[in-house]
Amino acid sequence: MNVRTRFAPSPTGLLHVGGARTALFCWLFARRRGGAFVLRIEDTDRERSTQASMDAILDGLRWLGLDADEGPFFQTDRLPLYREHVERLLHDGKAYRCYCSREELEAMRDAQRARGEKPRYDGRCRHRTGPSPAGVDPVVRFRNPTEGQVVFEDLVRGPAAFDNRELDDLVIARGDGMPTYNFGAVVDDLDMGITHVIRGDDHVMNTPRQLNLVAALGAPPPRYAHVPMILGPDGQRLSKRHGAVGVTRFRDDGYLPEALLNHLVRLGWSHGDREIFSREEMIELFDVADVNRAPASFDYDKLGWLNQHYVRQADPERLGALLAGQFERMGIDMSGGAAPSLLARVQRERARTLAEMAEKSRFAFEEYVEFDERAVKKHLRPAALEPLEATRARLHALADWEPAALHAAVAECAEALSLNLGKVAQPLRVALTGAAASPAIELTLQMVGRDAALSRIDRAIARVRERSGQS
């Protein structure tokens, strides 16, 4: 079988983690089997579809590296195809026009609720005769079978059966001729030769309806796999209150795409006790049949742990380019400062995200506004004046502003003053960054640069003299 999967988002919002995981599962399933991954944009909801949402979805897929083999295809470019199939079903008596007004439908549902029945269309237009009501743009409804069952094997959930009498005659075309979701999806899946439909389990109830439409169109159905929803830490469906955001927000917050993909693939799927999978390993090992039926929880701590792993493994040049983007978003001018790749090498063991890395490296480009008072009290005491002045003199005379030479200068100063290295390095660190924590002192000096380092040491010396009452 030539496997063909599809990801078919609606451009009515961002690409969230649930959709991204569905796209990943579809992509992996096709890649493992040498098949095709098709991207389809279901944009027939004209009122809610926006260009901004479409751009965000495509941008998110590009960032994740989930490249489509075909598409994107847009449903609004395929309207003649849907109309052709609607007319065919009408001609064959498998669909009919429904002239019920919105008020009539609401009154029907109210009466059903009052009788304790499930609200549903009662088929009153199935056998309507006589002239069409004036001023009404009819919808087209599918004449759903009234007997028997829809039976299929869900690749994740196992055998499923639905009684046709529980399924009403769904609308397949609106009054303006626009196809509804269920009908457009079926026509496209058949026309595009989709063999496997992998989607969230919130679509389970759509599947029997779609299978009846497939049968009415006389085509073999695709296989269906419904993957479990993603929950927040509190066991409720992942939503904005859990911090759920579009996937590009993870990019902006300094996560690497390989970390997010790794976390997403583990939401409902596993391979032994392994936690870390490269893209190639995912392709080799993933099978949708191994996805669990139980919901999975999105874990920001786990994502952070994974991201730190990939940050440590990443090429510094690549990290540097991404880090530069973080500084740009922070409004920091990097001109004349340390190379981003240098910062990445220095800081990648100290940060979980690139945003955190950028914040920890801010001192390399921006002088601090104020000293951390706790650091001042502990490290810029009168006893720090002599080592700061001596270190400044050695650094000023230094010809080579590289880590080895910088470390030697600080160490020699400590030795000359008969002090341990910390007694020299800590006041110097506070002078350079305004705080008591930073990378190794020689790396901190390298990040700040010669001119800025000497200027900041002068500022610290002035602060020590101020504290000690010296002019």
Image (spheres, rainbow, N blue to C red):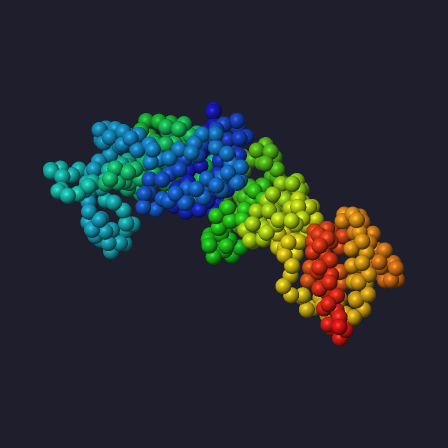
Residue pushed farthest top? 1
Q: Report the residue at 56% width, 53% height from top.
A: 330
Residue shown at the point (75%, 55%) measured from the top left:
441
Of 119 and 180, the residue lying toward us: 180
Q: Looking at the image, is 218 positioned above or below residue 343?
A: above
Residue in view at x 68 percent, y 69 percent:
373
Q: Residue at x 53, y 37 (%)?
A: 65
Q: How many marks?
A: 0
Q: Is residue 144 left or right of residue 15?
A: left
| Position above or below: 26 against 356 | above
356 to the left or right of 417: left
Asked whether the viewer can see residue 97, the reply is yes
Residue 122 horizontal/vertical position (percent): 23, 44
With respect to residue 295, does 222 lie above or below?
A: above
Q: Position of residue 94 (x, y in %)?
A: 25, 32
Q: Nearer the viewer, residue 125 or 180?
A: 180
Residue 153 seen by the camera: no
Judged from this view, the residue extending furthest toward the left is 130
Frontmost residue, 147 versus 215: 215
Quarter of the image for residue 211 reads: top left
Q: Which image quadrant: the C terminus?
A: bottom right
Residue occupying the far bottom of the picture: 469
* Residue 444 appears left or right of 155: right
Residue 76 spot, x, y in % from top left: 33, 36
Give how far across and how far down residue 317 sits, in percent.
65, 41
